[in-house]
Amino acid sequence: RGPYSGPDDGNTEGPFEERFIVSARRQYLRGTETVMAARLEGRQPVLLTVRANSLSKQITTDWQARDVRSGAWVGTKWTGITYAIKAINPTEDRAWIDILVESGVAS
């Protein structure tokens, strides 16, 4: 979690707070017309799958997901990938949660 840098970062409600770190399976979506259109606009739709537990069940579409292996904090800015959470769905067996996210979108 980095410190808040003020209004120039585009975040009007304050800084995002890191809640927890969890392992996730990342699957890049491809093939559909919607996915192709998103890529043309510079957005990358991804499906993250996490184990369902008391932490992951708190996730909402107001949150962001951050790939902690993709970057580092440089001053107050994260240099890695940040995803906007678009949809959250439990799997049929309720053991996992599928989270549809997009990188390359304004947050």
Image (tube, rainbow, N blue to C red):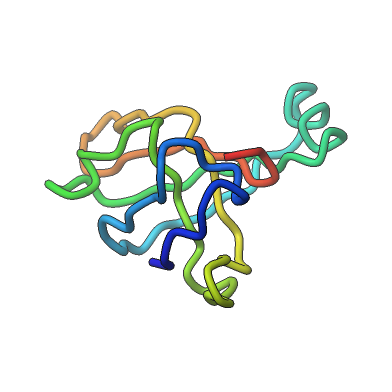
Residue 86, given in percent of the width and then of the height, sits at 50, 30
Provide residue 26's location: percent of width, then percent of height. Answer: 52, 54
Most extreme residue toward the right is 40
Q: Is residue 91 above or below residue 49?
A: above
On the picture, is 30 further left or further right than 57? right
Task: Locate the N terminus by quadrant.
Answer: bottom left
Exactly how many numbered labels are in the figure?
0
The one of 45 and 79 positioned closer to us in this rendering? 79
Q: Is residue 34 above or below residue 51?
A: above
Residue at point 62%, 50% (across, down): 8
Q: Residue at x 26, y 60 (%)?
A: 20
- The image shows residue 16 at horizontal and vertical percentages of 39, 50
Q: Is residue 42 above or below residue 33?
A: below
Q: Residue at x 81, y 41 (%)?
A: 42
Q: Nearer the viewer, residue 79 or 14?
A: 14
* Quadrant housing the C terminus: top right
Residue 97 x/y as whole percent: 32, 40
Q: Nearer the viewer, residue 71 or 100?
A: 71
Residue under the point 60% across and 66% down: 80
